[in-house]
Image (cartoon, rainbow, N blue to C red):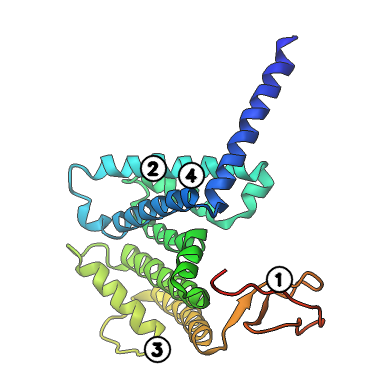
Amino acid sequence: MSYQPSTQRRFSAIIKGLRSWLLWLQRGRDIRALRVQGFLAVVDLAILAFFLFGPYLHDARSYLIIDYMIAVWIAVEICARAILAGDFKTFARRFMNWVDLFILATLLFPHVLLNFAFLRAMRIWAIGHSNILQEVLRRLGYSHLLDVVRACLSFLVFLFIVSGFVYSSFFYGQEGGEGFIDALYFTVATVTTTGFGDITLPGTAGKLTSIVTMIIGISLFVRLAQTIVRPHKVRFPCTHCGLQRHDADAVHCKACGHLLNIPDEGT
C-alpha cells in the first residue's frame, strides 16, 4: 500500500512533463520548435498526398504497409491530443479529434470502410488551422493573407469531400481515375451553378446531394470572395472588451475606445 501513492505521484509527474513537452512542441516559437513543427507539417502533407492518390495506389503491394504506418502515426497524434486535453470532455469538444478517430478506423479497416475514405480530406482543414501555417506566413510577410488561405483550404476540403462522396456513391464502378474525375467535374459544375447537365446524379438521393452541394458550396464560395475583398484586419484581442479584429494602424479599440498596443508585422 505504501508504494501506491509514490507510483501515482511518479505517473502524474511523467504526464505533467509530457504535457509540457507537447505544449512546447505545439506552440513553441524558438527555432527548435519551429523545425519540429515544420517536419510535422511535411509529414502531414505526405499523408495527405497518400490520401489523395490512394485510389490509384490501392492495388500496389506496399499500399497496406503505408496504410498501417499512417494509422500508427495518427494514433500517436490522437494520444498526444488526449494528453494535452487532460480530460475526456475537453478532448471531445474538438471536432477534428472525432474526424481523426474515424480516419484511423478507415486506415485500420481499409477494405471495410474504403467508401468513407473521402473524409480523409479533412486533414487539409487541420493543416490550414495549424500554428506552422500562421508562422510561415508571418515570416514571409504575408500574415494578412491567413484568412484568405484558410478560406481557400476550407473550400478545397469541401470540394474533395463532396467529390469523394459522389464518387463512392454514384461513380465507384468506373475503372481508373475516370470515376473520380467525373465526380469532381460534377461537384465543381454544381458549386459554381454552371449546370451543364452532361453529368447528373440519378434518383432522389442524387437530387438531394445536388441540392446540399449547391447550398453549402455557394455559401463557402461567397465567404471566400468576402475574405478576399474585405479590408485587411489584424487579430489582436482587446484586453478590455475582447474584440478580436482591428485596423492594422488602430490605436484605440473601435468597440470600447480602450488603448491598444498592436505589434508591427515584423515583430
Structural crowding at the residue carrying mark 3, measured as other residues with C-alpha within 10 Å and reported as few (<14), some (14–19) or many (≥20) = few
Instruction: Give the mark nearest the N terminus, 2 or 1.
Output: 2
Q: Quadrant of residue 213?
A: bottom left
Residue 88 drawn above or below residue 137:
above
Q: 218 and 171: which one is in front?
A: 218
Badge nearest the viewer, 2 or 3: 2
Residue farthest along the top direction in this orientation: 1
**Crowding near the residue tagged with mark 4, few <14, some 14–19, many ≥20 C-alpha atoms within 10 Å:** some
Disc 2 target residue: 71
Question: Does residue 117 appear anywhere in the picture?
Answer: yes
Inspect the image, locate mark 3, and give the three-letter code of the amino acid beneath it. Answer: Thr
Location of mark 1 (residue): 237
Q: Quadrant of the N terminus?
A: top right
Q: Amino acid at mark 4?
A: Glu
Mark 2 and mark 3: Cα distance apart in space: 38 Å
Secondary element type, mark 4 = helix
Q: Are marks 3 and 4 in contact (CB under 8 Å)?
A: no
Q: Secondary structure at mark 3?
A: loop
Question: Crowdedness of circle 2 by 10 Å Cα count: few (<14), some, many (20+)?
Answer: many
Separation of disc 3 and disc 4 at Cα?
A: 39 Å
Amino acid at the residue labelled 2: Ala
Cα separation, mark 4 vs mark 2, equals 10 Å
Nearer mark to the viewer, of 4 and 1: 1
Please name the amino acid that badge 1 sits on: Pro
Seen in the image, is 49 located left or right of residue 157? Answer: left
The residue labelled by disc 4 is 77
Residue 155 lies, in percent from the top left, at 44, 75
Mark 1 Cα shell of 10 Å, populated few (<14), some (14-19), many (≥20): some
Residue at image point 60% right, 81% down? 233
Tell me how far mark 2 sits from mark 1, CA to CA.
Answer: 38 Å
The circle drawn on residue 193 is 3
